[in-house]
Structures are given as structure tokens and as C-alpha cells.
Image (cartoon, rainbow, N blue to C red):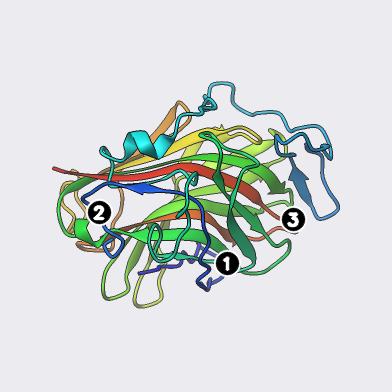
Amino acid sequence: MGVVLAGVAGACSLTTSLDGLTGGSVQSPDSSTTEDAGGPHADGSVIVPPEDGGAPDDAALPSADASDAASPIDATPFCASQAAKVVFCDDFDEDGGLAVPGTWDQVSSDHGVASVSSLEAVSPPGSMQIVTTAGASTYDCAAYRAFTKYAAKPYLFTFSFEIFVAQVPTTTGSEAVLSAFQLYNAAGVLDDLQLECTYDSALGALDVNFSENSHLLDGGAPYISHVSTAHLPIAQWTQVTLALTLEDPSANSSTNSATWTLGTSSTKFEPTLTVSDGTPEILTGITYVTPGDGAWTVYFDNVTFDATLL
């Protein structure tokens, strides 16, 4: 199921289209394809040039948090070392990355393009590059993968990826969801645990809100904020990880917990679930909450999903 993230309160609805692209991935035997630098620019964005020797437009923005550790560049094939340890992995380094069907269930391209790029990478040669269209009113440019095998059972789910934000809209209030973990059921109820980011001009970085956003059959969309004390830096690889413990997947429970880790900073909370016995799905890419005048360019690498039965 390709579930489209609708965004938080006040956001517009998003549509999804299929866009089969190519790159690289490795999956473990217990998963299956069926189961699953910058000053402001004229367009209101800040851009950091790729590390390919090209001429920069401006100087790079400073990193906001020295305490948020950047991930080192590593030439080791990432998924080749992870295949036997995780349910799903895509490092975008071999044929098959962003493949539909196959590695991903769908790749959406609503006012943006997802592709495999060699301009930036944690584990060379490739990463997933997302480039959005400036000024559009709706955005959904992301890769989706659901794991029906792991629905309705007590699991520890782990969703992890590396992210490099190269271009940011600097319009006041411009924000986007830069990946999410979703739980959905056959009735169409959806819970999102989101990496929601807003450009902070004072810091030259992104403020982070690990928000919860639910989509109910009656049209309601409960929204809960979990603001991080850390910030997502510009032009720096940063690892982001969600560890979601669902000891009782059928209801809200004090035994359920979510911990987002951004660099070296962690944010933990008890998730408020509206989905009973939901199917987990990962969304890697960009969906807009409040569009700005400029465009986003973001790279993702070493995306993994794992499920440990409790």
C-alpha cells in the first residue's frame, strides 16, 4: 500500500504517482518484494553545492549544533554488510535502488523528482536525491515501502537513514516532513511519526519536531508535537533513527514507546496511536507541510528497517 502523508494541521492534501527509477539495494532473506553554499537565492532558498568540484553559488551555511555528530564518509558497501542483520536496506549503490516494484512499493513525484545521485553519499557511490519544484502548493516526492508481515504483533521497529540537506527554502514558516514511519490498517486509518523540519534563519539550520499526525475516517487529523532540542544541520550528513516499541500493537499503552535519535540527541515519548494492529510503512523523501517560495534538495543514504519480535 502506498500511503501518502497528508501533513500536519493546516497542511494541504497530497497526491501520489508512480515513478520507477533505478539505483541499488540489498534485502534480507526474510523479506520479500510483495510483503513487503549558501546565501539566499532569488527563489527564496539557500543552496549548498555538491562535493563534485563544481563552483559554489555562495559560502556554505554553518552547522547549528556541534554536539550533533555528523556521520563519517565511508567507502564500505553498506548494505552488503547489513543484509543478514536487517529486514530491509537500500544504499542506492547497485542496480535496483528505487526500483518499483522491488526495493520500494512506489516512488512518488508530485512536484519533485527522486533519483539516484553520485553528488553526495555516505557510502559511495550513490544516494537518493530529492529535488522539489519551487513554489508549488502540494508536494509528495518520496519512496514508500510497507511490511505487511509485521502487522498486529508486538515488535520493536527500527527505521534509520542518513540525511544531507543541501538546499532549503528560507520563506518564514516554510517547513517539510523529511521522512516518516507510518502505521495503517485496511480501513484507511493512518498514524505518522514524522521528521518535521522548519528553516531557522537565526541558526542557519533546521528546527526539528518529531510530530505525530493521524488521519481518521471521519476526516479528523489529531496532531501532537515533540520538539527536539537539537537541530538538523545544513550541508552535513546526519544519522536519524526511530526506535518504536509496540508491546501492545492493538491499542494505546504505557508499554509502547518511541525514541527518535538525531545525531547524538534523543527525543523519547509515548506514542498516541489511533491505528489498531497496523501495518508498518516507511517513507523516505519529502512531503510539504507549509510550502515556501524556494525548493528543497535533500539526499538520503543507507536506509534500513528492522523488526524484532518482543
Q: Which residue is mark 1?
A: 109
Asked whether the beta carbons under mark 1 and mark 3 sit within 8 Å of each other, the answer is no
* Precedes in sequence: disc 1 or disc 3: 1
Q: Nearer the viewer, residue 284 or 203?
A: 284
**Helix or strand or loop: what does disc 1 sit on?**
loop
**What's the amino acid at mark 3?**
Gly
The residues tagged by marks 1 and 3 sit, at their Cα atoms, a distance apart of 17 Å
Q: Which residue is mark 3?
A: 294
Q: Residue at x 58, y 60 (%)?
A: 288
The residues tagged by marks 2 and 1 sit, at their Cα atoms, a distance apart of 26 Å
Work out whether 235 lies above or below 214.
above
Circle 3 Cα neighbour tier, 10 Å, few/some/many (<14 / 14–19 / ≥20): many
Judge from the rendering whether residue 291 lies leftward or rightward of residue 9; answer left or right.
right
Instruction: Report x, y in % for residue 199.
Output: 66, 44
**Badge number at residue 31:** 2
Q: Nearer the viewer, residue 38 or 118?
A: 118
Work out whether 57 lies above or below 103.
above
Judge from the rendering whether residue 1 lies leftward or rightward of residue 32; answer left or right.
right
* Precedes in sequence: disc 2 or disc 1: 2
**What's the amino acid at mark 2?**
Ser
* Quarter of the image that includes the C terminus: top left
Which residue is farthest top?
67
**What's the amino acid at mark 1?**
Ser
Q: Residue at x 52, y 73 (%)?
A: 17
Work out whether 169 lies above or below 268.
below
* Precedes in sequence: disc 2 or disc 3: 2
